[in-house]
Amino acid sequence: NNSASPLPVHRRSGRRAMVSAPAMVVSVAAPSALPTATASMRGPEGRTLPLQMPRRWGEHRWSGCGAGAFAGSAAAAAFLLRRRSTRAAVRRRGAGAGSAPRRALASKAPVEAPAAAGEMDDVERWYFSEYGRIVNHREMLEDVIRTQGFRKAIFQMCNDKVVLDIGCGSGILSLFAAQAGARRVIAVEGSPRTAALAKEAARRNGFDDIITVVQGRLEDEATYRQVDELLRTFASTSGGGEDEKPPRVAEVIVSEWMGYMLVFENMYGTFAFARERWLAPSGSVIPASCSVWAAPISGAAIVKDLAGYWCSLPYGLDLGHVAAAALEETFRRPVVEAVEEFRVLAKPRRLWRLDCEVAPATAVCSQRHSFEFEVERKGPMHALAVWFKCGLAPNVGFSTGPTSGDSTHWHQTLLFFGESGAPGEFAPRGQVPPEGMGVLPGDRVTGELAWTCEKRNMQVEVQGMLEKGGAGGQARYWGADYNWTLRPDDDPGT
């Protein structure tokens, strides 16, 4: 359950009851990124990062630099001061239905580990050390929308099953599986520190005879061979599968592999490898499906937060020239932030659906999708907000989209853009006009979102056209491209 992504892209500053006789749960530590996989993968239970606390957006008006700049409402002031709200009363949104098990294995040939496995480089070591930080796992557990959703799906799917937990982190999903009555649970975790904590959690809760924790990157031969042997033992004791190599006897594979914008960190490839190697022909996966959604938004409150101070004559001095640099420094990378629904300027659209039961590891690595929106609210348009929905099990799921209530820890990924001179061109990286692009109801926004993943890094492009008054109206072009590295310091432009 490595939902806490160790990406320093957030603007945030910091970051059960027994139900039935337990069975055995196996959790797998988060593996390394696949060769062709997305930016990076998600290992342990928490999403790391020195990210800034999520803020709510208040009313705003960009009025340039100077003594009167950024005249904001009381809501805007509250936005600047508000800390993260408690998640005790989180409201679930957009539950999607996962499909019933319907998977048929294409062949019985052994599935080999992805070629990305090998010696860990500095980025990989940093990645797993970040997932060894306790604060990241707490952030994941405090995300009630995410955690309760997985708990409900696990209780629905895992009774009397052999369960494989990929990237188990703190072990919370393995514990849920044991509570739900799983016969066995294998939990795999890549961070040595976190794997030790997961093992202790199983012992303290009386499930150490059900849950077996395997420490190591799943792509490493020593790790996946260990999982082979455990599953082979389980198959033997249940009267079947002794000779199958590898043993496809996992009845449920659960993994919280999703990253920002769904695919960032590229852990899906590890999940797909485990599915093809060990999932039984009639087995199920959690989540069963995911989809990427987007909508144009007003980012004026974020602009005000970033630039307003420099334009406020601090100590009676004119430092307004720093405002543009502050914006460029932040907007040259995707911004992870919570957006309230009233900041969304058009009805959201689904761009892409991922069938987790059958989609190969490479499915997430390169995608290009078009979009079209009809503006419904007046306002300045600054960015395209991107988020995802998950169908975990039949009639169980959640959304990470804009909400008037509490957000998930994923929030939304905001792709700020500047105006370009012609179709297919990008504005200089990070050059976002503070005033945005004015839109009115009836205006039409069209364009494309594309991404390519290379190990833990991700190239993102968004470009489009604003037609005033609808199709055929006066056209303005906009676009942005991002070199989204796992660590900000790895971006050559910083």
Image: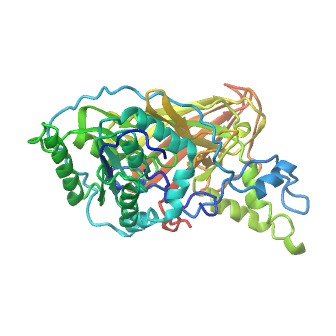
Would residue 70 appear left or right of 332 to someone viewing this image? right
Residue 289 at x, y percent in the picture: 42, 33
The quadrant where residue 290 appears: top left
Residue furthest to the left in view is 243
Q: Nearer the viewer, residue 419 or 327?
A: 327
Residue plotted at (73% across, 46% down): 436
Q: Nearer the viewer, residue 429 or 287?
A: 287
Provide residue 70's location: percent of width, then percent of height: 85, 55
- Quarter of the rendering containing residue 159: top left
The front one of 301 and 442 is 301
- Quarter containing the C terminus: bottom right
| For residue 381, side relative to residue 356 (left or right) | right
On screen, 361 above or below 227? above
Using residue 27 as the reference point, say whether residue 332 is left or right of it: right
Pinpoint residue 236: horizontal percent, then vertical percent.
13, 42
Tally the marks.
Answer: 0
Q: Nearer the viewer, residue 230 or 364?
A: 230
Q: Is residue 180 left or right of residue 280?
A: right
> Which residue shows up at 70% across the image and 26% down it?
470
Can residue 435 be seen here? The reply is: yes
Relative vertical location of residue 170 with respect to residue 361 in this rendering, above or below: below
Q: Is residue 240 above or below residue 491?
A: above
Identify the image's colour scheme: rainbow, by chain, secondary structure or one colour.
Answer: rainbow
Image coordinates of residue 50 in percent, x first then y, are 57, 64
Query: Is residue 41 in view from this perspective?
Result: no
- Determine the residue positioned at 45% across, 54% down: 45
